Amino acid sequence: MTGPAPGGPVPPPMPKFAAAARPALADTGLRRTLRGATATLRERTAAAAAETADWEDLREAGRAVGEGALLGLDTHLEELERAVTEAGGTVHWAVDAADARRVVTGLVRETGATEVVKSASLATREIGLNDALAGMGVTVRDTALADMAVQFAGDEPSHLLSAAAHRDRAQIGELFRREMPAAGPDPAGDPEDLAAAARAHLRERFLRAQVAITGANFLVAETGTVVVVESEGNARMCLTLPETLICVAGIDKVVPAWDDMEVFLQLLPRSSTGDRMTPYVSSWTGVTPGDGPRAFHLVLLDNGRTRALADEIGRAALRCIGCSACLNVCPVYERTGGQPYGPVHPGPIGAILTPQLRGVESAAVASLPYASTLCGACADVCPVKIDIPDVLVHLRGAVVESRRRRPVPTPEMALMRGLAWTMADPRRHETALRRGVRWARLLSRGGRIRRLPGLLGMWTEARDLPAPPAESFRAWWNRTRR
């Protein structure tokens, strides 16, 4: 879902969600791991929310602040740029992923560094930064424990909170044993042992790093402050030790004032990890002589966000604070994991955010709004009250409208147009009904139709159809009431 690295191979197109999900659905070990991980997080977040008497008031405050920030985004971005610049930082504007890659790789090239340390960041994943840096000979060291596991395995992340949620402790222990000499010959699967091994492995990298790259949870326009919340402390090491600090963040991360952080720093930890507060809340404003990095660069990424902002219904997705609560309650995500959604935004929030950022022209992205049961559990737990089912239905309408504009209609569209033509005339409808009933009864076995022919067979891949009665209601009515 991200662009290729400069000069690198063009990645194959993503398959539709249903096709991409089949391997996960067939992997019982993966499903067991996901079920355990999401259940634990569900219980923790529910308990954390329940102990807060004003939880619903906090959610409403988060919704109001987020919506207000989006409605005044142009003003807040100008204020943010001014404040960052006055504090000694440099702001770069990136219209899309390619532009952001060009900016960041250029900044790294200017330093002459051949290695960078990087904290967990959806924005850098969105622009394909790791591959871009690798393409110019720069080694990227992901420093979050879960991101390290994903990087070691060479696979894709699957969860907003823990990129390696699709792997159990034994698998992560094996990856660490293979890739980190400091882990020893047989690291245990205990989280403390794994964290200790990662700490020993990373210490030398942090101390020698000249450049660090981070994301941002929030950007405070009033003061020009970048805020990162985490549970491991690796991001704080990234923004403290290197001489050059580069932060890549979407323009939707802006909040108007520092006082707004009072709301979000209560909502985010309870909705993500079930904690009352996040272990590490790091904030920095520009540069300070003699303390921390000598150069700070903030790369503000659009990459489709302005287009999403123009959609009165869809822009609610930009309020997301990245807590992952919607993933943990989603029955679809629990069975498929995050990889079928693409390598950036998994789960229900990905199903509404990715189509808006990338458009619904490709079959893979157009399939995401349909990757939902519309049960509404995601909306119930969202800390900023994003009505995800409402946006999903809205985007399904956008997918249908985009198909109407195609010169060659899809098979589904051709079928719907044929049905509309048939049902527009009573005689055509009656004739089609009689013939359809005759053929359907021939296909049935034991009162059920288990497989329809041709493209219609996709409907019966996961369900049986009851055989139609020998006499239709209309025929029965005409026979008995006249």
Image (spheres, rainbow, N blue to C red):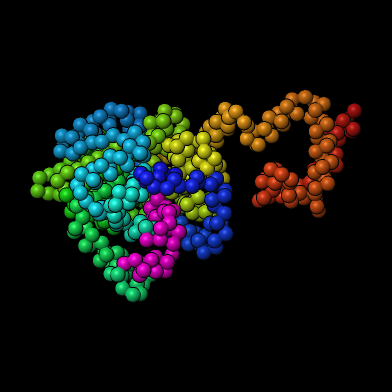
- In percent of width and height, residue 60 lies at 38, 38
Quadrant of the image for the C terminus? top right
Q: Residue 186 falls in which quadrant of the image?
A: bottom left
**How many numbered circles are shown?**
0
* Residue closest to the far front: 7
Image position, residue 107 (x, y; %)? 23, 43
Residue 377 to residue 410: above or below:
below
Q: Position of residue 275 (x, y in %)?
A: 34, 55
Looking at the figure, which quarter contains the N terminus?
A: top left
Can the viewer see residue 190? no
Which residue shows up at 37% across the image and 45% down it?
Answer: 7
* Position of 241 relative to 56 (above/below): below
Res 456 visible: yes
Quadrant in which residue 412 is drawn:
top right
- Magenta residues span 152-180
**246 left or right, relative to 412:** left
Residue drawn at x 40%, y 50% is 160
Q: Position of residue 37 (x, y in %)?
A: 44, 59
In magenta segment, residue 70: no
Foreground pick, 160 / 439: 439
Relative to 372, does residue 22 appear above or below in the rendering? below
Name the residue rendered at 66%, 51% in the picture: 462
Of 309 and 417, the residue lying toward us: 417
Q: Is residue 165 magenta?
A: yes
Q: Kindly give the residue lying farthest to the top in the view shown.
A: 425
Kindly identify the residue that appears in the image at 46 percent across and 56 percent down: 38
The residue positioned farthest toward the bottom in the image shown: 185
